[in-house]
Amino acid sequence: MIRKAKKLLVKYREQAAYLIVGAATTAINYIIYVLFLKVLHVHYIPSNIVAWVSAVTFAYFANGRWVYRSTSEGLLEAGAFFASRLFSLGLETLILYLMVDLGRLNELISKIFVTVLVVIVNYLTGLLVFRKKGPRRSRPPKG
């Protein structure tokens, strides 16, 4: 049984790592969102943007390192990651607006619903952003 579980974990390592990093990213997002919304009494859209910036910054480093095992170290990859996440921020903000302002639903309930959709979109765009370039090469010392 343990051997079978290990085999499944190896086979689905990327997806399992994505779930773990995603849970941490979501926790960061929600903690900051609730802090700004309920404690600091900031409108839900700016609260969502501040939470998004914090979560995406964490997600870039964690996903690149542990999920996709990216070997790229360039600004191009970081730019592509943030651009893909800007798309999901726009999607999240639009759906939140439709649910909260037009649908008159609770901000926190709406955020939970939107998160499910955004997690799926982010995983798929992450596959496009992080490329495995082969083993990292050490740079020769300058001198």
Image: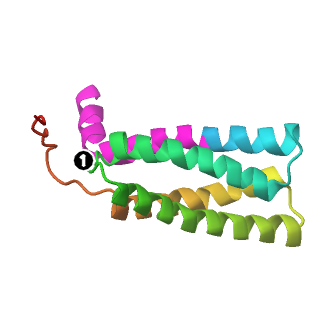
Query: Considering depth in this image, is 56 or 91 the residue closer to the camera?
Result: 56
Which residues, given as a range, are shown in magenta?
Answer: 1-26
Tell me the quarter of the picture where residue 5 sits. top left
Residue 139: in sight, yes or no?
Answer: yes
Q: How is the image coloured?
A: rainbow
Callout 1 amino acid: Thr
Q: Residue furthest top?
A: 2
Let me know if residue 6 is in the magenta part. Answer: yes
Q: Is 126 on the left-hand or right-hand side of 108?
A: left
Query: Considering depth in this image, is 143 or 95 the residue closer to the camera?
Result: 143
Name the image quarter holding the C terminus. top left
- Asked if residue 86 is positioned above or below residue 75 in the image, the reply reads below
Residue 103: in sight, yes or no?
Answer: no
Let me know if residue 30 is in the magenta part. Answer: no
Tell me the quarter of the picture where residue 136 sits. top left
Picture coordinates of residue 67 (x, y %)? 36, 45
- Asked if residue 86 is positioned above or below residue 134 in the image, the reply reads below
Picture coordinates of residue 72 (x, y %)? 27, 51
The secondary structure making up most of the magenta span is helix
Q: Residue at x 28, y 45 (%)?
A: 69
Q: Is 136 on the left-hand or right-hand side of 11?
A: left
Q: Residue at x 76, y 50 (%)?
A: 47
Q: Report helix, strand or loop for mark 1.
A: loop
Picture coordinates of residue 45 (x, y %)? 78, 58
Name the image quarter holding the N terminus. top left
